[in-house]
Image (cartoon, rainbow, N blue to C red):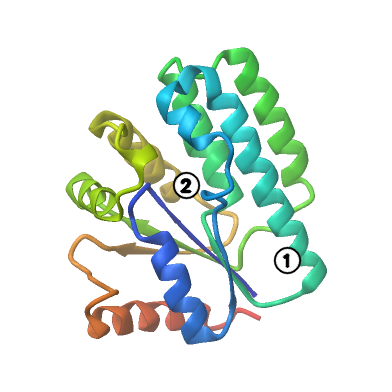
C-alpha cells in the first residue's frame, strides 16, 4: 500500500505524514530537506540553481519509489514525484527561472523514470489558501524559506489546482486544510482519518 501526500509549501504534508504513519502503522518517507545541498543556494539564486535542485529532488524521490517496490512495505510518502514534474519545474520555466533546454532535459529524465514507477494507491491533496501557507511557513522558521514570495506560492497553488483536477493515475482525496488544525485538535485529525478510511475502502 502506497499513500502519498501532496500540497504546496507549508500545507502540512510532513506533519500529516507523521501523524498518519503513526495511526496506520505505515512507514513514513519524507522529503530530503536537511541534507539537500541545493536548497539554500536555490532560494538565494533561483535561476542559477533551479535545474540542479529539481534533478536532486527527482533522483531522491525515484530512489524512494524503487525502495518501496523492493521492500514491499506499507508506506506514506511526503510529496510525490509528479509534483516536481507537473508543478515545480514547469513553474520555474514559466517564471523564466529555468531555461527551455534545461526543462526539456529534466522532462526527458522524468518521462524515463515514470515508465518504471507505479502511481500511489491513494493521493491525498492538502488544499490551502495563501494566508495559511504563509502563516505555517513563518511558524516553522526555516531560514531558506524566508525569501519565498506570495507570487511564487500563488503560482504554485494555481498549478496544484489544475493538476489535481485532471489527475487520473489513481484515487485522489482532496482535503481543505485552511480551517483544520490536525496537530492541536484531535477532532480535526479524526475527521481526516475518517476521510482516508473511506478512500482506502476497496483498495488492496
Question: Which residue is painted at 31% across and 37% down in the image?
Answer: 153
Question: Which residue is painted at 48% across and 18% down in the image?
Answer: 47
Q: Could you say where residue 185 lies in the image, as x and y percent from the top left?
A: 22, 80
The N terminus is located in which quarter?
bottom right
Asked whether 45 or 66 is in front, the reply is 45
Which of the two discs, 1 and 2, labels the residue nearer the N terminus? 1
- The answer to which image quadrant residue 113 occupies is top right
Q: Is residue 199 visible?
A: no
Question: Which residue is painted at 46% across and 25% down in the image?
Answer: 92
Q: How crowded is mark 2: few (under 14 residues within 10 Å), some or many (20 or more)?
A: few
Q: Can residue 66 be seen in this view?
A: yes
Left or right of 53? Residue 151 is left
Left or right of 13? Residue 127 is left
Q: Could you say where residue 103 lies in the image, as x and y percent from the top left?
A: 60, 22
Q: Could you say where residue 177 lies in the image, as x and y percent from the top left?
A: 26, 63
Q: Could you say where residue 67 lies in the image, as x and y percent from the top left?
A: 76, 63
Relative to 191, residue 96 above or below: above
Residue that numbered label 2 is attached to: 166
Residue that numbered label 1 is attached to: 68
Relative to 33, residue 155 above or below: above
- The answer to which image quadrant residue 150 occupies is top left
Distance from label 1 to label 2 (Cα)? 25 Å
- The answer to which image quadrant residue 52 occupies is top right
Asked whether 122 or 11 is in front, the reply is 11
Amino acid at each position: 500500500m502506497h499513500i502519498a501526500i501532496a500540497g504546496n509549501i507549508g500545507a502540512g504534508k510532513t506533519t500529516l505524514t507523521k501523524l498518519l504513519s503513526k495511526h496506520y502503522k505505515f512507514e513514513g518517507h519524507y522529503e530530503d530537506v536537511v541534507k539537500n545541498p541545493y536548497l539554500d543556494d536555490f532560494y538565494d539564486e533561483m535561476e542559477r540553481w533551479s535545474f540542479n535542485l529539481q534533478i536532486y529532488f527527482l533522483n531522491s524521490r525515484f530512489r524512494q519509489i524503487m525502495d518501496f517496490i523492493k521492500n514491499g512495505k506499507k508506506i506514506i510518502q511526503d510529496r510525490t514525484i509528479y509534483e516536481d514534474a507537473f508543478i515545480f519545474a514547469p513553474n520555474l520555466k514559466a517564471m523564466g527561472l529555468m531555461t527551455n533546454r534545461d526543462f526539456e532535459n529534466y522532462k526527458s529524465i522524468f518521462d524515463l523514470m515514470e515508465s518504471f514507477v507505479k502511481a500511489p494507491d491513494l493521493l491525498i491533496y492538502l488544499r490551502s489558501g495563501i494566508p495559511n501557507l504563509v502563516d505555517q511557513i513563518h511558524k516553522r522558521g526555516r531560514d531558506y524559506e524566508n525569501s519565498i514570495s506570495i507570487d511564487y506560492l500563488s503560482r504554485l497553488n494555481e498549478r496544484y489546482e489544475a493538476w489535481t483536477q485532471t489527475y487520473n493515475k489513481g484515487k485522489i482525496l482532496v482535503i481543505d486544510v485552511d480551517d483544520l488544525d490536525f496537530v492541536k485538535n484531535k477532532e480535526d485529525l479524526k475527521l481526516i482519518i475518517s476521510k482516508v478510511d473511506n478512500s482506502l475502502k476497496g483498495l488492496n
